[in-house]
Image: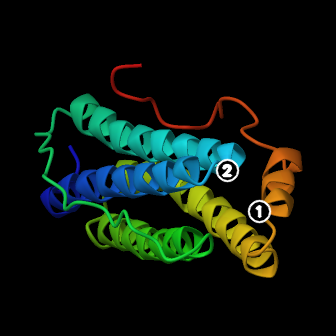
Amino acid sequence: MPAARFTDQLNVQIGNELAAHNQYLACAVHYDALTMPRMAAFFYAQALEEREHAMMMVQYLLDTDTEVVIPGVDAPISTFADVTEPVALALAQEKRVTEQINGLLRIAREEYDFASEQFMQWFIKEQVEEIATMSDLLAVVTRNRDDVDDIEEYVAREPGDAGPDPTAPRVAGA
């Protein structure tokens, strides 16, 4: 049985992941409206990934016979001044989520909750990748803010999803 302090915070994190989903959805819609289909597709995919993270957490709580609480989330920011602003927001969001994930791992360690600590390891690795991806994208978008075709080309040629990660936690409902 996971530590109560950990599961309370994991339920909060489910809300954080769903809020990230909504924020990425708003970013995708912004790029879709600008007729930037590759940036839109990138952020639609990011939105689905964040939802999947939330559902991994839901499945962990279900697997450990722990109450799942799906919290409400605030509306995302949906108006952006230019093509760089959504990516800068995404990078800041990923840094914030990294702090939240690290906090969950810290709680698991403090509570000697070894199963929960092990569960969080995949998310630690995932956040390193997320920050690297958003940092690179922000550099490209900033450098090419006046040339959306270059931005679209970059997104098109960068490797996308490599397929399912066999080390990833199970996803509820999948």
Residue at coordinates 79% horizontally, 61% vertically from top-left?
151
Amino acid marked by disc 2: Met
Q: Which color mode does the image show?
A: rainbow
- Depth check: 45 or 49 in front? 45
Percent position (x, y) of residue 41?
62, 41
User: Disc 2 vs disc 1: Cβ atoms closer than 8 Å?
Assistant: yes
Q: Is residue 35 left or right of residue 4?
A: right
* Residue that appears at 65% across and 29% down: 164
Residue 38's place in the image compared with 55, above or below, is: below
Residue on which the image places disc 1: 148
Indicate the secondary structure of the residue bearing disc 2: loop
Report, in whole angstroms, how far the alpha carbon at label 2 lies from the one at label 1.
7 Å
Reply above or below: 25 against 96: above
Residue 46 point in image, percent of width and height: 54, 48
Seen at 42% across and 75% down, the residue is 96
Badge 2: few (under 14), some or many (20 or more) residues near its Cα, within 10 Å?
some
